[in-house]
Amino acid sequence: MQEFFQQLTPRWFQRAHVYVGSIGPCFHDFRFRFANDEKEHRITASVYSDKCFERAENVKTREFPWDEEGVEALKLWLEENYQQWLQG
């Protein structure tokens, strides 16, 4: 699993309501965005590439429960999408 994804825990997501990041060389990178809903206790994760989230045309989004099992599922989903990106 990609090193950054391994660091994710339910507590990690308390650092910001929206968090964006990327892996890879500039202008050809795997990008991700997390938006937290504290009221519903859910995390909305998105993956995309090449442009900012608002302009990207290839956004994939999925919601996960904000708990241990949900974060583990989120990490697996990120890794799966990252591997697909590497092959593409």
Image (cartoon, rainbow, N blue to C red):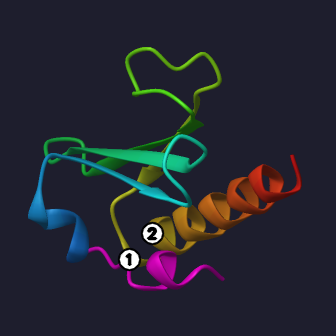
Are the residues flagged by discs 1 and 2 in contact, CB closer than 8 Å?
yes
Identify which residue is drawn at 78% across, 62% down: 83
Tell us which disc is closer to us: 1 or 2: 1
The residue segment tinted magenta is 1-10
Looking at the picture, tell me which residue is in the foreground, 6 or 67. 6
Using the image, tell me which numbered label, if any, was put on residue 70: none
Q: Residue furthest front?
A: 26
Q: Amino acid at mark 2?
A: Val
Residue 85 x %, y %: 76, 50
Residue 37 x %, y %: 21, 42
Residue at the spot of label 1: 8
Q: Amino acid at mark 1?
A: Leu
Per the image, label 1 sits on a secondary structure element best described as loop
Neighbourhood count class around disc 2 (C-alpha, 10 Å): few under 14, some 14–19, many 20 upward: many
Residue 11 left/right relative to 65: left
Residue 21 x %, y %: 36, 54
Identify which residue is drawn at 38% across, 77% down: 8
Task: Look at the picture and state if 67 lies above or below 34.
Answer: below
Task: Look at the picture and state if 31 lies above or below 25.
Answer: above
Residue at the spot of label 2: 71
Spatial separation of the CA atoms under disc 1 and disc 2: 7 Å
